[in-house]
Image: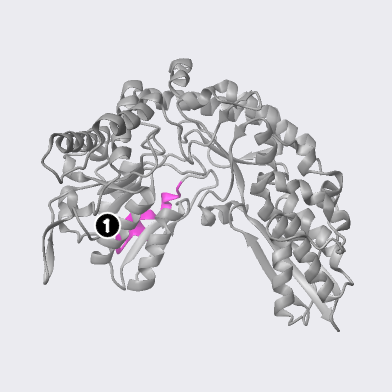
Amino acid sequence: MTLDVEKIRADFPILAERINGKPLVYLDSANTSQKPRAVIDAMSSFMEHGYGPTNRSAYHLAAEATERFESTRAKVARFVNARSVNEIVFTKNATEALNLVARSWGGANLRAGDAVVLTHMEHHANIVPWQMLAAEKGFEIRWVPLTADGLLDTSGLDRLLDGAKAFSFTAMSNVLGTINPVADLVAAAHRAGAVAIVDGCQSVPHMPTDVQAWDADFMTFSSHKMVGPSGVGMLWAREEILEAMPPFLGGGNMISDVRTEGFTCAELPAKFEAGTQAIVEVVGLGAAVDYLESVGMANVRAHEREITAYALAALKGRFGDEITVHGSCDPDLRGATISFAYRDVHPHDVSQVLDQHNVCVRAGHHCAKPLMRLLGANATVRASFYLYNTTAEADVLCDALAEAGDFFTL
Amino acid sequence: MPGLEDLYREIILDHYKNPRNRGELPPPAVRTEGHNPLCGDEIEVYLQVEDGVVADVRIGGQGCSISQSSASMMSAAVKGKKVDDVRALVSRFKNMMSIEEGEPDTSVSLGDLEALQGVVKFPVRIKCAVLAWNTLAEGLDTAGA
């Protein structure tokens, strides 16, 4: 292994938990990730010794709390290579960040006759906000199709983008694991005069991110998928775009002045952060970024590439034609998120048997129902690996799957 | 942790492998759809109600073993029964699934359906077991029964 996985596992207290005497095999990080001691301690320590309001009061505790909060913003900016801290907006989660883009940017820039291009592998968070806006504004939504391998079929992309104002796509599929060629897709969007919106939820936690190298316009991602706490999402966007956008939520913190006749907005990034923020959670996120930086994102990717290759070979080797792994078999083109169908055993039943062995996977539509329909399945089983998972755990998955097969021989 | 045998009793697996009353019924039979958005279970219940009796019933759809076997067992349990008795059975079943409050009406016999009792130990699967029954109740409402 490229990482010292045992050392990393020791950093995550929950991995020492035993349920019914058996260790936890957590293969659902694409859903949400586990937290290292450093994140847990940062949050409780902050609450015990340093908690105070941010940006409101003049006393020492408030100044310190503000500094902790804003230093996380700076860490996140560096983590994704943003140009400035003004380009990082904190939200509740990535879904809210995508809604912010749709409502605030989309609401101001899209009208009937325009088009927004999405892809057939998008998560509902990058579909529904556009559908909601389209119902109001009357613009068209177009869809980039997929190849049989679960990659984007870009053969007709320029045609699809012709006349489009926005191209919103995922950097890595939460179902297929497909890693999309973001820089190329951004370039295609810009050639067509469209903005490029990247859903980075599955990619930012698992590989190095450079929004400047991508030349993207927006990117959304979430804390809880990158070993940080739940309750914080992030939007990165070019400063000039954010400046031009109307605010999203209204209230305190995002204003400069409020009179009975109206209000003026605060400067970036506060303009998009209405009300009291998730102060404790942002402090936790700061510790999460520190932790991942100490491991090194290139190392995380190398580790996951190794596990992906191992797991794919193990599943195919053990079950052959009885298992259908969705998406590409090339570990260079996909991440360690593996969705599959196992014989005719329903995903729900598979996950039940796996649960007996404390193997945690997700069974369902993974918030990607259009993609499920394309795959011809109502549901799939999804096992997703992260920096704290091992190839041995892929073996446990295979053993448990074999048991599910025996149990449900139809 | 409760074991798999608590959930997947023999009779449940039998109904999953050999589902009863599969198919469709033409109009004027009532067709009702139900689905479990969390996991993708889908069900279609076709009801032929004549003179206050469920004269015929068919089940369509796809899903996990619990949802499908529950639907199959339901179809066998309600066929030929008076609508009032069917409604009482729905209530009794949902009571067993801990969805309905109150003391169960023990005069209503569950028969084979008792096998689904184990589902209660796996709360995530309760929705699977109950899907067909909620769809059935909706179908009865639509049939004006």
For label 1, the crowd category at 10 Å Cα-Cα, with few meaning under 14, some 14 to 19 and many 20 or more, is: many
Colouring convention used in this rendered image of the protein = one colour
Look at the picture and state if A33 lies above or below B36. above
**Quadrant, the N terminus of chain B:** top right
> Within the magenta stretch, is there residue A154?
yes
Of all chains, the one bearing label 1 is A
Residue A282 relative to residue B27: left or right: left
Q: Percent position (x, y) of residue A371?
A: 53, 53
Q: Is residue B90 visible?
A: yes
Residue at the spot 58% in from the left edge and 56% down from the top edge: A373
Q: Percent position (x, y) of residue A279?
A: 28, 41
Residue B61 relative to residue A285: left or right: right
Give the camera-side residue of A222 and B109: B109
Give the camera-side residue of A338 and A387: A387
Q: Which image quarter: residue A81?
A: top left
Q: Percent position (x, y) of residue B74?
A: 81, 62
**Quadrant, the C terminus of chain B:** bottom right
Q: Which image quarter: residue A207?
A: top left
| Dot 1: element | loop
Residue where numbered disc 1 is placed: A194
Residue A46 relative to residue A66: left or right: right
Q: Is residue A288 visible?
A: no
Look at the picture and state if A65 lies above or below A245. above
Please give the count of numbered marks on the rendered protein.
Answer: 1
Residue at the spot 53% in from the left edge and 38% down from the top edge: A328
> Within the magenta stretch, is there residue A406?
no
Residue at the spot 74% in from the left edge and 32% down from the top edge: A403
Q: Which image quarter: residue B131?
A: bottom right
Give the camera-side residue of A54 and A238: A54
Q: Which residues are magenta?
A: A152-167
Look at the picture and state if A345 lies above or below A158. above
Residue at the spot 42% in from the left edge and 41% down from the top edge: A172
